[in-house]
Amino acid sequence: MTEKTHVSETSSEEVEASASLPQEAKAAKGESAYKRWFDAHAPQVLVVAAELALIIVFSLMSPYFLTVANLSGLLLDGAVYVLLALGLVFVIATAGIDLTPGFGIAFTSVCLALTMTNMPGPQWLAIIVGIAAGIASGALLGACNGFLVSFLRMQPMVATLSMMLVAWGTALVLTGTSAVPLSDFKPFLWLGNGRTLGITNAFFLVIPAIIVAHILLNKTLIGRYALAIGSNEEATKLSGVNVRKWKFRVYVLGGIFTGLAGILMASKLGSGKPDVGQAYEMYAIAAAVLGGASLQGGRANAFGAAIGALLIATIRNGSVIMGVPEEWQKIVLGAVVLAAVYLDVRRGDN
């Protein structure tokens, strides 16, 4: 009887232990799933945390930061960076680079302004054709980049640096170095300067752009092939993918986002300016990398790039409110770019 009782007690303990195992396994599985999620989204989490920290700091240091007018202006500035960063996400995913977005804004806004002001007929038609010209000129710029990189096999940095100068020079030549005013086109100016429900209209342009970029990057061939090319171009080519064709399309897509940014900038400034956009390409690259894109290719995140762009805009906006001199702002933003590149290197090493 004693032995039977002992066996019974032992069996009972084993049953209780085995019953507890699934719960422990579920807990471990939950922790593992959380860890995998955090590892996959660590850059985005860190950027969001940095953005919230900046908002708190600037709010405490200045009573003007959290005003509706200032936040609206911040979102408007950030919208331009977001659009540029979204285009660069695809290019960087292929392990390429594009230095044209900065002066690409100048080029596309000038093309828009000249088309709009010289278009006969009703004003609404001139606005539509002008916007189409802005997008088309951006696509043309991207096509030139894509042709040089994909078919002539030039180094992306050299090719796009050259095209950056070409875009800038063309904008200056087309305008005679003078801005092209758009003050007569009130409906168009409403896009960049108007508000809906107290929020800048640029916000309602950028949100769909972010969603579209996310879908293109993760759910369509252009995004999947861009990531595949960046991960291993040779293997992608051996799998039957026409790498040259898809890389060309990626640069065209990047140019289209530059065209959208140029449209928004022209509306914001009320003119097509041939000298606008200096250093914007560096801010956009930093935004994309801060948001999780890797300069080594194969990794990118549209939502992360948007958050990174908002972080850059917040730094610039807060610095202006705090009265930080322009030269010091450039130093701070340069440090942010370096930090973004360093973080990318560390992620690659890990």
Image: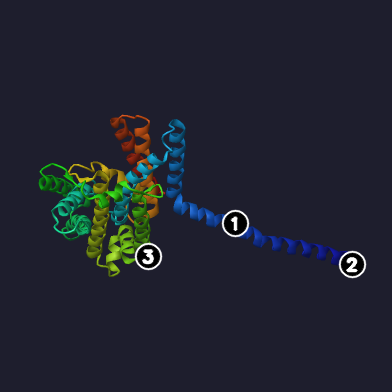
The colour scheme used here is rainbow
In this rendering, position of residue 176 left or right of residue 235: left
SS for dot 3: helix
Label 2: which residue? 1
Label 3: which residue? 219
In percent of the image, x 13 and y 53: which residue is there?
118
Q: Nearer the viewer, mark 1 or mark 3?
A: 3
Q: Is residue 273 visible?
A: yes
Residue placed furthest toward the right: 1
Label 1: which residue? 28
Which quadrant of the structure image shows residue 230?
bottom left
Q: Residues within 10 Å of mark 1 (few under 14, many from 20)?
A: few
SS for dot 2: loop
Tell me if residue 238 comes above or below residue 309 in the rendering.
below
Q: Say which of 231 and 47 sits in front.
A: 47
Residue placed furthest toward the bottom: 240
Q: Quadrant of the N terminus?
A: bottom right
Question: Where residue 298 sits: x, y (%)?
Answer: 34, 57
Tell me if residue 242 comes above or below residue 271 in the rendering.
below
Question: Where residue 154 sits: x, y (%)?
Answer: 18, 54
Instruction: Tell me which amino acid carries mark 1.
Output: Ala
